[in-house]
Each structure stands twice: as structure tokens, then as C-alpha cells.
Image: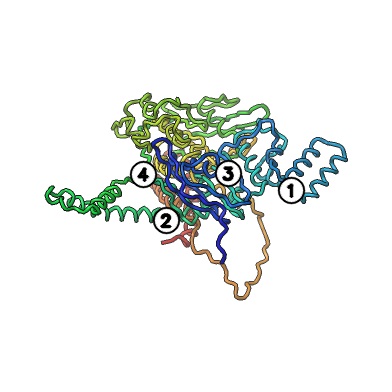
Amino acid sequence: MSEPTNFLSVQNLSKSFGIRTLFTELTFGIALGERVALIAKNGTGKTSLFKIITGADAPDTGEVVFRNGIKLGYLSQDPQFDEETQVIDAVLQGTDPALEAVRNYEHILRYHETPEELQRAIDLVEHNNAWNIEAQVKEVLGKLKLEDPYAKMGSLSGGQVKRVALAQIILANPDFLLLDEPTNHLDVDIIEWLEKYLSSFSGAIFMITHDRYFLEAVCNTILEMEDNRLYKYEGNFSYYLEKKQERLQQQDANKQRMANRYRRELEWVRQTPAARTGKSKSRLDSFKEIKAFVKQRRDNAELQLEINTQRLGGKIIECHRLKKAFGAKPIVNNFSYVFKRGDRIGLVGDNGVGKSTFIKMLQGLEPVDGGKIIKGETVKIGYYAQDGLSFKEDKRVIDIVKDVAEFITLTKGQKISASQLLERFMFSREEQYNYVRKLSGGERRRLYLLMILMSNPNVLILDEPTNDLDILTLTTLEEFLEDYPGILLIVSHDRYFLDKLTNHLFVFEGAGEIKDYNGSYLEYRVEKEWQAQPEEVEIDIPKKQKGKKEKVKTKLNFNEKFEFEELSKTLPKLEARKAEITAFFESGSTDAEKLQKMSAEMQALQSELDEKEMRWLELSEFAEE
């Protein structure tokens, strides 16, 4: 068997900023067919490593070597184009003669040049065998929802610019893709299409992403930066989680053994001066190594958020027949909803359909054209906006928090200092004295979230909160939000985040229509796909080929495991509510209005229970013991 073709060799890379070391002597390679994701905590150097590999920065030591002759495609987090450039020119940039021929042909068609010029353009496309590229251009632009190929780049939104950059890379047909947060600012439909494209990509991929469903579907290798080192996991995201857990358990076991040895060595070192006279240098050196190992603190601090939340009154937020439009474009058309305690709502839909406008209307930041919004007196909204908060670059992190409060009250009346609060948000004592200008994008967002929660909101609105956050921060943020006692509204393209935290959706379908969907995002997608199938399809089932084994399902995939775990949590809650309603019926109450309301709820509850129990039984057949 031949050795895999190596596309990238990284040898002994080191990088520091002042006295801060990001990584030392990192060595790894990426071969043809590998789809590699780099994950790490914010601020540990993954962006710096990526910049070094793409040539945007230089290492302190080491080298990066690409295989000769391979074609690179690089997607940055914030792609830049000339504002006057048209979309078609941007996606067909490059020196490839076939791309040039297609670009020329598209312009001739657009601007109605002479028949002779059109014929020359056609001849040029045929000469370069580029008709398949011309067809691919239309397909890719359609899939990425770039409807006007002649729009100027300066007129596009950030999400549209990202899609143009993606189209440019795909159409350039590279051998090696370098992708920095490819799912940021993309619609879910486009993310899912991109998953399929990258999963079948025949070259090599190296990416940074925090999208866990994307990691699961696309990647076959995970590289994790931790403690200035690199750990390699040859599998997808669920494999990484499993093997990292094993590594940490082994590390804890080793640490315990070393601690016991450290204790014995410490007793030996602390003997009387007379007894220490003959100590061997090798044993003292060994003691220093053990001490360093035991004292090493694994940084798995959790985002512990226990900030006090003001109690909600009976009236929260009521939307009555809301209307909103920008010119001839309707954003919200006759929408009504009364928010209830415990609401955990996800807002989903394509970019530009009005999700951000809607949440601004709820806060009074955007006027309504019709209808009304009524807010209760006890409502206190915390709003995490997409564009974040502007901090003074020359201020230290600790001073920004102290400007709001020196001490913060927690849920049980306890108080902690600004420094202690920052530690709970995973800013070490050392990092608290960093200037804002030195913070990474993820660290800035973490600080922004802290500032919002310090105001003790009981309605929390999060607009794309997962952008730029590392997986550790996302996981711990999710743990907090799962226990958050107030109302939660989330706008996000992170499907995993939505599935974990919401059980109710406002689906923005365009033209001002908002569908009120009672269920999780995963349930909505499954239902949508099911409805898209033909009602009756006749399928010719071929006879089983002799000697060919049928593929039998033996275990749950990553999404099914997640669904099974969520169902296992949801079913007991539904059963408990059913028991409450049953107890009410048995109480002998004569309140006709409440009896009618409870009866309707019981009917809907029983239907939901039947459906979810059936699905749980289907999944449980393949769930691992």
C-alpha cells in the first residue's frame, strides 16, 4: 500500500508575543483526503497558527512547507473585495484561462455586445472546454443564494460577502482548502449544503470552526491546542470527545500517582540538613520534575454564572398583530404572541428576513408600523447584539468590570469581587490585567456577555452569540443557559446550540410570515424534510444479490445520540405535567374555564407524548448500554 500524499508539513513551530508563549515546537502534517479541524480555547493561538500556515504571519521558529504544485484555496473570517467589483468578477477571479473565458462570456451576454464579440466569447469557452464551468457557476451561485451576479460587492451584507468568497474558492477548484470559521454568518440551509460539499471533497482541508454538527459531519481528524501542545484525534467530533475524556481520565490517574510520589519525595527533601548532605543530584532533579508536573493546573475552568435575576411578574411581553416593513419589503406581517415564564425560543430563517429587526422591535429599539407591544413592569431585558460592545482599547479588562461595580450580588445574596467574577468567566488573574486591544475576538465576546449579565436581566436576548466562541466556552455557556430562570430568545445559525437550549421556534419564512413552531430545531428540520418528500413513491426493491451482505444499523449516529438524550430528558417532564393535570381533574374543581383549558392542554400533551415515546423507542433499540 502506498504512503498517503503529504500536502502540508509543519515543523517545530513556535510563537510568542512578548513574555506570553502561544505554542512551542508544534509539528504535524496533513495528507490528501484528510479533513482536519483545529480547535482550542480562545486566546491560545489557533488564529496565530492559522495565519502562519497561510503566510499572513511568520513564526518565531520552525517552518511550513506545502507540497509543490498544489493549488490552495483560502477563506478568511472577514473576506475583503473591492466595493466596485461585481459578484461574477469576484467569484471568477484568478489566472485560470477557463475561468477567464467564462467571465468574458458572462459579460458579453450581460451587456449585449455585437454578434461577432459573442461568437468570439463562445469560441473561447469551447477552446478552454469551459462549458461545464459555466454550468457550475450557475449551480454554485444558486446554492449560495447569490441571486444577482452583477451586484457590486459594496452593496452586499457581510453574510453575502462570505458566500461570494466561498463561491470563489469552490469554482477555483483547489487541491487544499484552508477555512477560517466557514459557517459564520451563513444560513442553515447553506451550512448544510456546504457540509455535503466538503464531505465529498477529494483534496485536503484544514479549518477552524466551532460548529459541532459541522465538525461531526465533515472532519475525520481533530487537532486540539492545549497547554502549548498539540493533541491529534483521528476521527470526527464525537470520537474526539470520547478520546479526550479518556486522555483526561488517564492524566488524572497519572497525576494522582505522581502526587503520591511527590509526597514521598517531599518528605525525603525535608529531612534534616545532616541527612541531606549525601543527596544525589539526579534525585533532586527528579523531584523538581515531579513537582512541576503535580503543580501544573489543567485549565478546564467552567463558566459559572450565578448572577441574580429579577423576578418576573404576571405580564411579561405581549405582541398583538405586529406589522413591520422596509419600503415594499414586509418584515413582520400580523404576528401575535404572548410570552410565558420558561419560554426558550429560537429564531431561525435566512439572513435578511427580519430576525434582528424583530428582536429590536421587542426592545423598542425599532418602531413598529402596526399593532402593539406591551411589556410588563418587571421585565428587564439583557441584549447581546451581533456587533458586540465597543470597549476602550487602552483599558484593562479588570477596570472595565470595576467601572460597573466593584462587587456583584449572586443568587443567594452572596457577593463576589469583580476579579472573582472575571475568573468565573475564564479570565485568569493574569489575563484580567491585559489591555482590551490584546483580547481575541472570542475573549471580547466573553467580556461582553459578562457585562450584560451584570445587569441581572430576566429576559435574555442573544443575537448570534456563538460567533468566535471556542467550544469550551460554548459548552459552559450552554450549561448556564440550561438553568437560566428567565425567558430566553436566541438568534443563531448554530444548530447544536439551538437544539440544546430551545424547545420552541419562531420560523421566519420570508415576506413577513413567522411560523410559531412548538418543538426543537432538530424536530423542525426532520418534519420539514419529511413534508418535502412525495406522498407516495413506488420503489422497485432489487432482489438481494447472492453473497452480498446487507448493511445493518447497529448504533446511533451523533445527531441521533443527541436526540435520544434530549428525549430522555423531555419525556419525564411531559409525564410530570400530565400527572399535574390529572390531579387537577381529580380535585373536583368546578372552574369551567380552567377545566376547558386543562382539557385542551391534556389533549395536546398526550399527542406529544405518544409521538416522542414512539421516537424514543425507535432510538433506544440502537442506543449503547
Give the alpha-carbon distance from disc 2 to disc 1, as whole Å.
44 Å
* Nearest to the observer: residue 130 or residue 15: 15
* Nearest to the observer: residue 288 or residue 176: 288
Considering the image in quadrants, where does the N terminus appear? Answer: bottom right
Labelled disc at residue 477: none
Give the alpha-carbon distance from disc 3 to disc 4, as whole Å.
33 Å
Three-letter amino acid code at disc 4? Asp
- Look at 49% across and 44% down and name the residue there: 210
Residue corresponding to mark 3? 188
Residue corresponding to mark 1? 135
Q: In the drawing, does residue 477 fall left or right of residue 81?
A: left
The secondary structure type at the circle numbered 4 is loop
Q: Can residue 334 be seen in this snapshot?
A: yes
* Earlier residue among tags 1 and 4: 1
Horizontal and vertical percent for residue 381? Answer: 45, 29
The secondary structure type at the circle numbered 3 is helix
Considering the image in quadrants, where does the C terminus appear? Answer: bottom left
Residue corresponding to mark 4? 299
Q: In the drawing, does residue 110 fall left or right of residue 142?
A: right
